[in-house]
Image (spheres, rainbow, N blue to C red):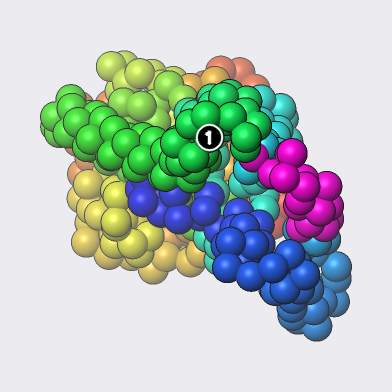
């Protein structure tokens, strides 16, 4: 998910409140409230009819709009009208502050209503909070500037009131748009620069899709970052290869492997490249690790494997083949068919990888071994 999409989704969280503010500038207060409430109540009704539930964030919209309406009524007198924009904007600042500085990402949760079918991973939530942090300080500073400008305007009867009122109008309106535009431009330039530097740094690395536990792609990252950050869930394929006697082929990992060197592991296992289909990755890994072009592959189960080094969404299959096999010596130092009773006898002795022993337990639950 790029920065443009992040900004669009964050803006969606403000939608009902923005409707009120725009209407408040174009119509009188009663019409503004009616329009904004109609938008929120319509969404509330549609959600209830479709999902048979009351959307708590739509209810929050209604409460915030009523609060904004109350502020507008309270500050409708000439004495306080100049600080009304600061009070309204302060409500936005509070909403952003709750999202950024507490464990409750309120605004991000509000924006999820407009992202049907889109999943947010840890990276996307982090990016949203990071962008909102800058917006929080910018808008807070703008609130203080509005208050200072309102105080500076003073009484209508004093000399230079019109000029001071024009300064206040610029500070409370146009200045915010200029500041937001400058921040968006700065973020865009900074993001492009960082993206180019990042791509240069990892241009020779393998890239994996970052996925949710349900397999939805939410980003991509280089292999060297995935191996070292358990928050970057990525996909792998495993194949358990049996022969016609029911024996299970295992590979012995090379002593040079960074994870579990020298231990016996699943018949075939490998990462799914970014943009690669599971079926294509399956055929590629079988070819690379066994030297054969194709075998019958039966899908068994999917699960998430997580340790201190990495997290993987494992797509597991069963294959039938009697060999012979040819494997890459730099990756696999040996391979053989194991009788199932011999595997059971050696479980828990440090001979097999923990991940294989976990999978063997799953195979037992399915009565495959």
Total tally of numbered discs in the picture: 1
- Write down the region rendered in magenta: 63-82
Q: For this view, does 76 lie left or right of residue 368? A: right
Q: Which residue is mark 1?
A: 161
Task: Pick whichever, 205 or 288, lies toward us.
Answer: 205
Q: In x, y percent, where is residue 155?
A: 65, 32
Up-down relation of residue 69 to residue 273 (above or below): below
Up-down relation of residue 337 to residue 348 (above or below): below
What residue is drawn where x is 76% and y is 51%?
76
Q: Main secondary structure of the magenta part?
A: helix
* Label 1: element kind: helix
Q: For this view, does 73 lie left or right of residue 170? A: right
The residue positioned farthest toward the bottom in the image shown: 49
The verdict on residue 208 being magenta is no
Please tell me in which quadrant of the rendered image residue 100 appears: top right
Task: Pick whichever, 97 or 241, lies toward us.
Answer: 97
The verdict on residue 81 being magenta is yes
Q: For this view, does 219 lie left or right of residue 107? A: left
Please tell me in which quadrant of the rendered image residue 341 appears: top right
Task: Pick whichever, 100 or 337, lies toward us.
Answer: 100
What residue is drawn where x is 72% and y is 45%?
78
Q: In x, y percent, where is residue 19?
A: 61, 64
Q: Is residue 43 visible?
A: no
Q: In x, y percent, where is residue 237?
A: 42, 50
What residue is drawn where x is 33% and y is 62%?
277
């Amino acid at each position: 998910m790029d920065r443009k999409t992040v900004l669009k989704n964050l803006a969606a969280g403000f939608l009902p409140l923005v409707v009120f503010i725009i209407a408040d500038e174009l119509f009188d207060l009663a019409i503004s409230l009616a329009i904004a409430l109609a938008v929120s109540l319509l969404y509330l009704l549609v959600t209830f009819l479709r999902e048979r539930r009351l959307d708590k964030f739509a209810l929050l919209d209604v409460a915030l709009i009523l609060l904004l309406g109350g502020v507008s009524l309270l500050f409708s007198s000439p004495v306080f009208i100049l600080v009304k924009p600061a009070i309204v904007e302060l409500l936005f600042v509070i909403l952003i502050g709750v999202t950024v500085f507490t464990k409750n990402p309120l605004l991000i949760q509000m924006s999820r209503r407009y992202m049907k079918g889109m999943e947010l991973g840890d990276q996307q939530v982090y990016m949203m909070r990071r962008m909102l942090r800058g917006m929080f300080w910018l808008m807070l500073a703008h609130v203080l500037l509005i208050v200072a400008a309102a105080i500076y305007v003073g009484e209508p009867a004093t000399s230079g009131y019109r000029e001071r009122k024009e300064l206040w109008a610029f500070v409370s309106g146009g200045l915010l748009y200029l500041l937001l535009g400058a921040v968006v431009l700065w973020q865009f330039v900074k993001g492009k620069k960082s993206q180019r530097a990042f791509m240069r740094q990892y241009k020779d690395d393998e890239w994996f899709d970052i996925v949710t536990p349900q397999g939805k792609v939410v980003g991509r990252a280089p292999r060297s970052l995935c191996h070292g950050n358990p928050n970057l869930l990525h996909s792998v394929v495993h194949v358990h290869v049996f022969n016609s006697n029911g024996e299970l082929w295992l590979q012995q990992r090379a002593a040079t492997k960074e994870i579990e060197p020298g231990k016996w592991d699943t018949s075939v296992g490998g990462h799914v490249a970014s943009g690669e289909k599971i079926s294509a990755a399956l055929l590629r890994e079988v070819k690379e690790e066994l030297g054969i072009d194709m075998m019958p592959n039966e899908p068994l189960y999917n699960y998430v494997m997580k340790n201190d080094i990495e997290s993987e969404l494992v797509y597991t299959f069963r294959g039938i083949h009697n060999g012979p096999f040819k494997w890459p010596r730099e990756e696999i130092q040996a391979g053989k068919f194991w009788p199932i009773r011999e595997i059971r006898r050696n479980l828990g002795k440090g001979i097999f990888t923990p991940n294989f022993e976990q999978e063997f337990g799953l195979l037992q639950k399915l009565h495959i071994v």
